[in-house]
Structures are given as C-alpha cells and as structure tokens.
Image (spheres, rainbow, N blue to C red):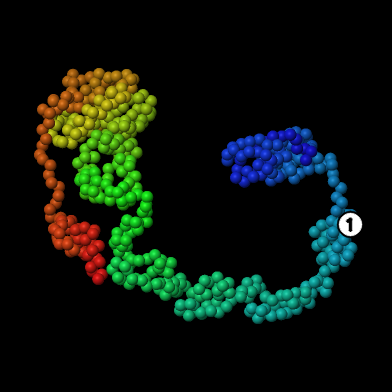
Amino acid sequence: MMAIIEGQMVKVKWTTKNKKYFELFGYQFTCKGEEFEIRINELNKGSRIEIECTCNQCKDIFKREAKRAFKSDKHFCSNECRNKYNKLNPITPETKVEYNCDMCDKSFRVANYRFQQVKNGEHENLFCSRECQGKWNSLNRTGENNPHFNSIKINCEYCEEEFSVPKHRQHTAKFCSDKCKRIGSRKRIEINCGVCNKKLEVAPSKIEQSKSGQVFCSNECVGKYNAIRHKENRINKTCLICNTHYDVKPSEAEKSVTCSVECQKIWQSKYLIGENANNYNSNITSEMRMHNCDWCGTKYELKAPYKIKMREQGKSLFCSIRCYREWYAKEWSQSLEWKDESRMRAVRMLEDGTFNKTDTECQMIINEILDNLKIKYENEYNCKYYAVDNYLVDYNLMIEVNGGYWHADPRIYHEINYQNQVDRIKNDKAKNTYIKNNYEINILYLWEEDILENRELCELLIKEYIESQGKLDYYHSFNYALNDNKIEITNNIIIPFMEYSIEELRTLINIVGKKKNKKQADKWIIFNCDNCGTEKEQLISHYKNNKSHCCSVKCAVEYRLQLRK
C-alpha cells in the first residue's frame, strides 16, 4: 500500500447502489448522477475508479484501478518494470526442495508436497521432464509390470457383449463403450399416452413435471386433452337478458351475467345507471347533473362526471348526436376560429407530408434546378395559414410553382371558367398579401408552361431573383424571355388574375355548367326494416352482404334478441 499516493481526492457519481455507503461517511445525497469528491481511503474496495500510484521500479506516477491497487503490495507501470524488479529482488521459494531425477540423476527443484508423497510411499518416482518419465516407463513398465497386464473379460450391462478391462476396473466398469453408457444409464419408465393409450418410454422427471400427471405422444393429443378438460371445468349459467344457457370459466363465473357483448350492453344500460354506475359520484346531486342542450334547449341529465367538468370549463354539451352534428355544421364550422384552425391544420399536414404536393413534374424540375445550383431550400414551408412551395433558407426568399389550369394561366384562359380556378385565384391573392405584410417578401412565380418548355429561363430567373435580393420588375415567369442566354422583359406585359381587383375579377368569371349529382341511382336499393318496418335506403353491395336488414343498430340488436327467443 506504500506505493499508493496518499491524500488523493477522486470524483465519484451518486447512484442508488452507493448512496447508503457514502452516507455512512457523512456525505449528503444530492441527486442521482451528480459528481462529488471523496478521499481514496473512503473508496469501496471493489471500486473501478482509477487512482494514482508510484511504480516500485522506475518511481513514475501512473493510474491504476482502485480494486487492483488495494489488493497489491507492489505496483508496476508496465510488465518490463515488473520483470526488472523480480530479477533484482528474487524471492527464495520456501515451498520447493532439491531432488535428483530418478532417470537421469539431474538435480531440479520440486514442490515440497510432491517430495513428501514420494518419501511416504504414495508415489514411486519423480522426473525432471516428460522425456525422462517416458524413458523410465518404457524400461520398467513392460510385460507383467504393466498395470493393464492380465486384463479381465466382463459383460456389458446394456448390450451384454463381452469386453476386456484392467484388473483394477473389474468392479467399476459396466459398459463396453460410451454409446452403451449413454443409453444404458438412462432411467426410463413405460407409460401410456393420456389420450390414445400409445405406449411411451419417458424419463421419471417428465411425469413429475406434468401438472395433470399425464404424458402425451404428440401435440395433437395435448390439444384433445385440453379441450376435454376445459369443457369439464366450465360452469353453466343463464343469461339475465335473453335467458340463453352458456358456459363460462370458473374464474369468470361470479362476474358473468350475460351470454354476449350485445346482451352485456343491454344489461349495463338497464342496471349500471345512476347510483349503480361504476363511476357514480355521490357528491354530485341530481340538480347539478341537469343541463340544457346547447343546441335545442332540451333539459337532460349529465350521467358522466367528466361532462360536468366540461360544462364548468365552458364547453358545449348536447342531448344527442343529432344536435351535436347540427351545431357543428351550422354554427361551429362557420365560425372564424374553426376556419383559422382548419387552415393551420392543412398547412401542418402539408409540412409533415401527410399528403404530398411536392411530387408533381413541375415541382420536381424546380427542386432539381435548386439542387444543381446548390441552393438550400424547404418544400411546403409553413407560414401559419399558408404553405409556400419553396423557401430558400440562406436568402430568405420564396418561390411558388403555378399550374396552368389550377391557377388560370392568362396566356391560356382569357376568362375564368371553373369554380376551382376562382377558389385558387382568391387563395393566391390572399397568400401574396399575407406574405408581403408579415414576411416582407415578394414571391417569385414560375408557371407550368415555362418550366416544361423553357427550363433555362427558369434557372436564370432564379439566379437573378437571388442576386437582386428578391427585387424584380415583374415576379411572374411569363413576363420574361431569353435573348443570347440572358433574360429580358417581354414587350407585352401580362397581368395575372391574382393581381386583379375583386370588381375586375367578377367581370371575368364565366362558370361553365352546373354541379352534377354524383349519386348513381342504380347502385342503391330501398327496403323496409326487419324490426320496425321503417323505409331505408342502402347500397346494394352492403344489402347483399347482410342476412338481416335493419334501419339502425338499436333495431339490429332487438331483432337478434327476437330470433334467439
């Protein structure tokens, strides 16, 4: 221990295992994983933390695991130092004595206990090497002196064949080979299969491990036995709703009261209501449970405690699903709050890739151009209410890819003929205004015809857009042309529909045709409910898949209960 440098301080971390140990030394636990300093004499004897030691040979300071350092009296920084030290400070072996080899008479050192065995007659000879031992055996252990001389013949206990063994093994040898020993030493019991009575040879441990006390010849017999046992152990009960007899497991017998899920629902609706409900709160009075429907005004009881909490939080509650649907369609979905949430939700879905709009041919071409120019960009960039096709990250600029039909390219459409185009132009107009007001960015619009037929123009226009820091005379690709590999503004400037005023747009709208009813009458069928006789319309494909035809889930349950009776 003298080679360990005294007075060292080492850092350890608090763990659940060392907490009690270090608290005994007066340290106060702070939190798991936090480091603190201790003295080396307070370290656990099995610690793997490295501490500083002085090499007993070269006197250099080196680090060693505390676990090893505490066990050793001497410490060495390398094997070379250890070997040098052992040569300079040899240890006289007290446990060895001088002895002359019984073959070559050469003196050598041998363990004292082996010398004592020879002296006491337990062993005959000692040799300095294996070579000398082999020479001595070849001279002195031949013929009658060989321990295997005059072997005795006995019969194998398994195959009963005769084989030879030395005299000293005549009472211990039982088998002629390892194969016979392996098979003959097995203890097997003959028993019949628990199902088909086929004879089997099995180990006693297999019978002891079997819970049923039976052994089976195959998995098929195991399955048959389990099926018989399960039927025997089942308890017969009568359903409280439809009076049908059914079997249940013994563990479920006390709780089970119905034969099916449908009957269970009916039983719960009759008996597990009000004070008998599992989650009934006696602190809430019947007056506190009464509530007026927020749509139709009908007074009804709030049975679930969580709905009372919802009312306290100011949320709308309804007496039926029908009232909820009417409120949602006529009031909530028409509110500005819902529309804002819907727009933001749609933008998030575009950003997350829930539905992908970046795989169009035009968009893929623009992405390829940006990749070739080594411009970092983001597709479907989230601007809260709107998503921009390409956001150039390093330049804080934006690019929109416009399709000819959807955004109504003025070179193709001189008036707006479709409602889809009207909706998209309104959205483009609002998006452009929102981006200018909130981000102070003028968007560059690249149109489908230019992207597909004049890719070089689009590439040069993007470069010009970046070099000018987003400041161009015109921001639509159809107002530019190529001249000697340079972009120039065309003579005939085209104004896109999104830059028209609302009054000007109204004069250009000329919707072609009317919306058609997409319902295919030949695929629907009208029938009468099997339970209440109400007339109902349903798809023929659904009608054919069902044996019974009902107008609602309630009628379907009642109709099945009637069939069981």
Locate residue 216 relative to residue 29 in the image: left or right: left
Quarter of the rendering containing residue 34:
top right
Q: Secondary structure at mark 1?
A: strand
Q: Residue at x 51, y 79 (%)?
A: 192
Q: Is residue 94 above or below residue 40?
A: below
Tell me which amino acid carries mark 1: Tyr
Q: Identify residue for label 1.
A: 99
Locate residue 31 relative to residue 82 in the image: left or right: left
Number of labelled discs?
Answer: 1
Percent coordinates x, y for residue 416 in the rendering: 14, 32
Instruction: Decide: few, some or many residues near mark 1? Use Cα within 10 Å; few <14, some 14-19, many ≥20.
Output: some
Percent coordinates x, y for residue 551 in the rendering: 19, 58
Q: Residue at x 51, y 75 (%)?
A: 214
Near-viewer residue (478 or 505): 505
Figure quadrant of the C terminus: bottom left
Percent coordinates x, y for residue 255 in the rendering: 39, 65
Q: Residue at x 31, y 32 (%)?
A: 384
Q: Is residue 59 above or below residue 433?
A: below
